[in-house]
Image (cartoon, helix red, strand yellow):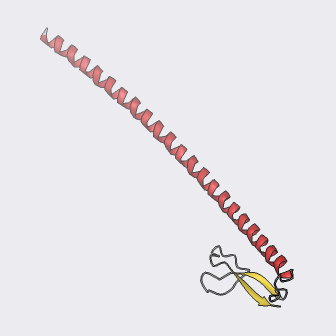
Amino acid sequence: MRDAWDARVAAIREDIDYKKAEHALDKAGRVADEAEDDALFAIDFAYAAIEEAEYAVLEANLARIEADELAATALTARSERVPLLGGPSLAGLHMRPDFRHPISGGSSPGSRSVDRTPRRWACRRA
């Protein structure tokens, strides 16, 4: 009888161990699925952030172009006006933005360089 009891207890323990392993396997599968979902969300979020950054760069470039055009228009309109208090005439001056090349330091208005930090207006007589 003792042998039958020990066999029954061993079968129950084996069944419990099997159920624990099955439960751990199911839990590990759920954790892996959640981790994959989190990774996909992070990738989608990163793509969206990159796309927003690209649009921000494009908007900044457009704003810079508009500001440069507006400044050039304002300076041209101002130079064509008659001086108010009899000061020197600006009609002979051509105003243009002075772009310094970031490496050579030379003036390069046609450069496609992004770094245009020193924004000054250079004046020269026609």
Q: Please tell me how many numbered marks the rendered image carries.
A: 0
Give the percent coordinates (x, y) of residue 11: 25, 18
- Of residue 85 and residue 69, the one placed in the foreground of this image is 85
32, above or below 52, in the image: above
Taking the spot 26% from the left edge, 22% from the top edge, the residue there is 14
Give the percent coordinates (x, y) of residue 51: 64, 54
92, above or below 54, in the image: below
Quadrant of the frame with the C terminus: bottom right
Horizontal arrangement in the rendering, residue 79 relative to residue 51 (left or right) = right
Give the percent coordinates (x, y) of residue 47: 60, 51
Q: Residue furthest bottom?
A: 125
- Of residue 47 and residue 123, the one placed in the foreground of this image is 123
Give the percent coordinates (x, y) of residue 74: 80, 74
Taking the spot 68% from the left edge, 63% from the top edge, the residue there is 60
- Of residue 117 and residue 74, the one placed in the foreground of this image is 74
Classify residue 2 by image quadrant: top left
Classify residue 31 by image quadrant: top left
103, above or below 23, in the image: below
Horizontal arrangement in the rendering, residue 32 relative to residue 50 (left or right) = left
Classify residue 59 by image quadrant: bottom right
Taking the spot 31% from the left edge, 24% from the top edge, the residue there is 18
Quadrant of the frame with the N terminus: top left
Q: Residue furthest top?
A: 1
Q: Residue furthest left?
A: 2
